Amino acid sequence: YKVYIIDEVHMLSQAAFNAFLKTLEEPPSHAVFILATTEKHKILPTILSRCQIFDFHRISVPSMVSHLKEIATKEGVNASEEGLHVIAAKADGALRDSLSMFDQLVAFAGKDLTYEVVTEQLHVLDHDTYFEVIDFALTANIPDSLLLFDNVLARGFDAHHFLTGLGSHLRNLMVCRDAKTLALFEATPEVKKKYEEQAAKADLYFIVGALDVVNEADTQYRTSQHQRLLVELAIMKICSLQSAEKKKTDDLIAPETLAAPVVASKPAPAPEPQPVQQASAPEPTPAPVSSPSPEPAPAPTPVSTPVTAPIPTPSAKVKPTGFLRKKGVSLAGKSAQFAESNKTTKEAEENTLDPSWNEEPTLEKVKNAWDDYVKVKRKEDRISLVASLTMCEVGLEGKVVKFEVKNALQEEQLNSERAGLLFHIRQFVKCADLELSIKLEKGADDAPKMFLTDKEKYLKMVEKNPALEELRKKFDLDLA
C-alpha cells in the first residue's frame, strides 16, 4: 500500500476538492488516503461520505498530568502536581504541546519544577493573584485591587490576559459552589479546597454580577481606546457589587422605618384611660374618653370630644405606604394624588366656608377670581390645567358661574378640580351661594359624519374656494 496523509485538509481549494473527489470515486487498490482536520464541517459532504471517520477528542487535564508524572519519574525530574496542572492547562488538550513545554522547562530550570517556576517561565498568572483580587472585592477594597492590577502589569502581563484569567477564576468559583458541578473543575485537591473556601464567602449575586462585568469588558477590549482604564473600571465595578447589594436591601427596608412613627402615635392615648379609672373623682374630663360603654352617665361629655377625633384620620392617609427607596418613589400615580387633593379640598371647603360671604357677584369679580386661580396653578406647574382654564371665556348667570370646554378630556379634568376652583371663586368674590357649571361645548363636530365620494368632496371644496373650478377648466381636467 501507498499511504498518503493530508494534514489540514479543510484548507484545500474548491478546485482541489473537486479533483480529489474524482480520485476518491475510483480509488486505486494500492493507495490509502488519511485526511486530518480540526474543522470537519468545511469538507465537502461528498468526500465525507466516502471516508471512514474517527473523532479524536482533546486529552483531559488529569490524563495529561498522569502521563507527565510517568515521564518525570522515568527522567528523574522532581515536578510538583500543581506545576504539572499548569502545563496541562496551558497545552489545552494537546499532549504534544505539553511535552514540548515540559522539555523546555527541564532544560531551563533543571530537575526541580515547582509551581512558582512553571508559572514564571510559562508567563502564566498564578491563581493566588486572582484569590487576592476576589478577597479585595468582597471587602470593597478598590485601592488595593488597583494596586494589585498595576503590579500584574509591571510584571509584564497583558491586561487582557489578566481579564480572561479573572473570568476563568470566577467560573471556577461558580462551579465549586455545588458538589454536583465540582467535577467540572480540574485541579489538585489543595487548590479545590481554596476555591471551595472562597466560594463559601461569595454569594451567588456577587459571582454572577462579576462574571457579567468581566464578560462585558472582554467584548469591549479590542475596540477600546484606553484598554487599561477599561479593565480598571471592571475591577471597580466588581468591588462595588457587595456595597450595591447592601444598599439595595437597605432601601427596601426603609418603608418600615418610615411607617413606624405613624403606628407609634396611635397607641399613645391608650395607656391614659387606665390611671383615669383609678382616680375618676379628681379628673372628670379624661374619664369619658376611656369608658363611654361601661358608664352611660358621662355619655353627654364625649359629644364635644369627637370634634378632635377626625383629626388623626388624614394623617393615616399621609402614611407613606408605597415607598420603594429613601428618595421617595411612590407607587401611586398622579391621578391618585389628584383624587386625594380633591378630598382634602372638599373637606376644607365644608369646614372653612364662611356664611358671612353674601356679596353680590359680578362678572368682573368672577373673571378676576378665575385669573387669580390660573396664576396659582401656573406656579404649581399645572400646565395642562392652565391651558384648559384659559381656552374659553367664563360667564355668569345669576349666581351660577358657567364655563364651556372644547372636549370631554378638558371636562373631566376641570370636574376633578371643581371643588378647589369653586371654593377659590367663592372666597375671592365673597359669595357663599355661587355655583359652578362646566359643560361640553356643542359645535359642528357633533353633527353626524357623512361619507362623500371624490366628486362630492370636490364640490364641497369648490363651495369654499370657487377658484378651484376655474383652475380645473383652465387645465381641461376631468373628474374621475
Image: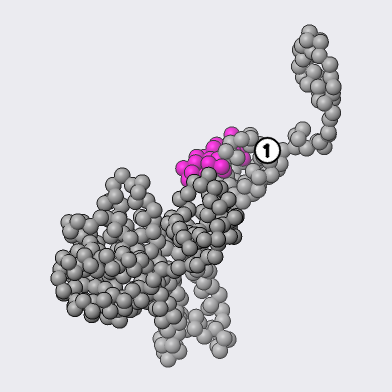
Q: Name the residue under label 1.
A: 406
Overall secondary structure of the magenta section: helix
**Closest to the observer: 426 or 33?**
33
Secondary element at image label 1: loop
Residue occupying image coordinates x 48% and y 63%: 1
In the rendered structure, does residue 376 fall within the stretch colored magenta?
Answer: yes
Judge left or right: residue 404 versus residue 175: right
Residue occupying image coordinates x 41% and y 75%: 184
Q: Which residues are drawn in magenta? A: 361-386
Image coordinates of residue 267 in percent, x first then y, are: 45, 79
**Amino acid type shown at disc 1:** Lys
Q: In which quarter of the image is residue 468?
A: top right
Judge left or right: residue 94 versus residue 423: left
Residue occupying image coordinates x 51% and y 71%: 309
Image coordinates of residue 34 in percent, x first then y, are: 47, 61
Question: The C terminus appears in which quarter of the rendering?
Answer: top right
Tell how many labels: 1
209 versus 366 height, above or below: below
In the rendered structure, does residue 177 fall within the stretch colored magenta?
Answer: no
Image coordinates of residue 171 in percent, x first then y, are: 37, 68
Q: Quadrant of residue 145?
A: bottom left
285 versus 438 height, above or below: below
**Closest to the observer: 321 or 45?**
45
381 versus 198 height, above or below: above
Judge left or right: residue 171 versus residue 304: left
Asked whether residue 150 is in view, the answer is: no
**Closest to the observer: 82 or 131?**
82
Estimate how packed mark 1 is, as few (under 14), some (14 to 19) or many (20 or more) residues with alpha carbons within 10 Å.
Answer: some
Residue occupying image coordinates x 53% and y 44%: 15
**Closest to the observer: 369 or 118?**
118
Colouring rule applied to residues: one colour
